[in-house]
Amino acid sequence: MAAESPSGWRARLRHAFAVESDGPVEPAPSVRAIVDELLQRVVKRRMVVPASMLLESWRPMGAVSGQMMHALTPFTGVVIEAHVWTALASYMEKRGAIPWMVDRLAELESQSSAAERASSD
C-alpha cells in the first residue's frame, strides 16, 4: 500500500470538519474600523449592556447570523452601504468574532467612563 499523500482523503476529511478555535478573532484593519465605529456608537448611546446581551445570545449561532446578514444584503442597501454590510457579515461568520466584539465593547466603555471621570475632575 502506498503512503498517503498530504492531500489524501484523510487530510481532505480533516479539513472538511475543521473548526476554528474558540478564542477572539481580531478583524482585519478595514473591518476593524467598521466594527469600532459601530461599537463606539453603542457606547455613546449607553447601550453596552443590551448590546453585550444580544451578542452573547448570538454566540452559538454566530456563523448562521453572519450568513443571514449576507441574505439580507439586498434589503439593507437602503440603510447602509453594501460593502460595509458585507464586510461586517463576513466578519460575523467567524467563530471568534462575537467574543472579540464583546471584549472590545467592554474596553471602549471603560475608556469612555475614564474619560468622563477625567473631565469631571
Image (spheres, rainbow, N blue to C red):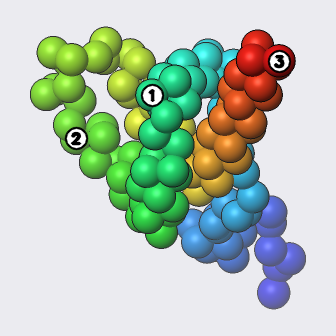
Q: In which quarter of the image is the N terminus?
A: bottom right
Q: Residue visible at 67% across and 72% down?
A: 14
Residue type at the position of mark 2:
Ala
Upstream in sequence: badge 1 or badge 2: 1
CB atoms of marks 1 and 2 within 8 Å = no
Q: In terms of image quadrants, where is residue 5?
A: bottom right
Which residue was labeled with disc 3? 121
Residue 83 appearing in the image: yes
Secondary-structure class at tag 2: helix
Upstream in sequence: badge 1 or badge 3: 1
Q: Residue visible at 28% across and 16% down?
A: 80
Please say if 106 is above or below 23: above
Residue farthest to the bottom, as pictured: 1
Q: How far apart are marks 1 and 2 (CA)?
A: 28 Å
Residue type at the position of mark 3:
Asp
Q: From the top left corner, tell me how far across and down residue 57 is, in percent.
A: 44, 64
CB atoms of marks 3 and 2 within 8 Å = no
Which residue was labeled with disc 2? 71
Q: From the top left corner, tell me how far across and down residue 72 is, in percent.
A: 20, 37
Q: In terms of image quadrants, where is residue 82?
A: top left
Residue 90 appearing in the image: no
Residue type at the position of mark 1:
Arg
Secondary-structure class at tag 3: loop
Q: Residue 45 carries which label?
A: 1
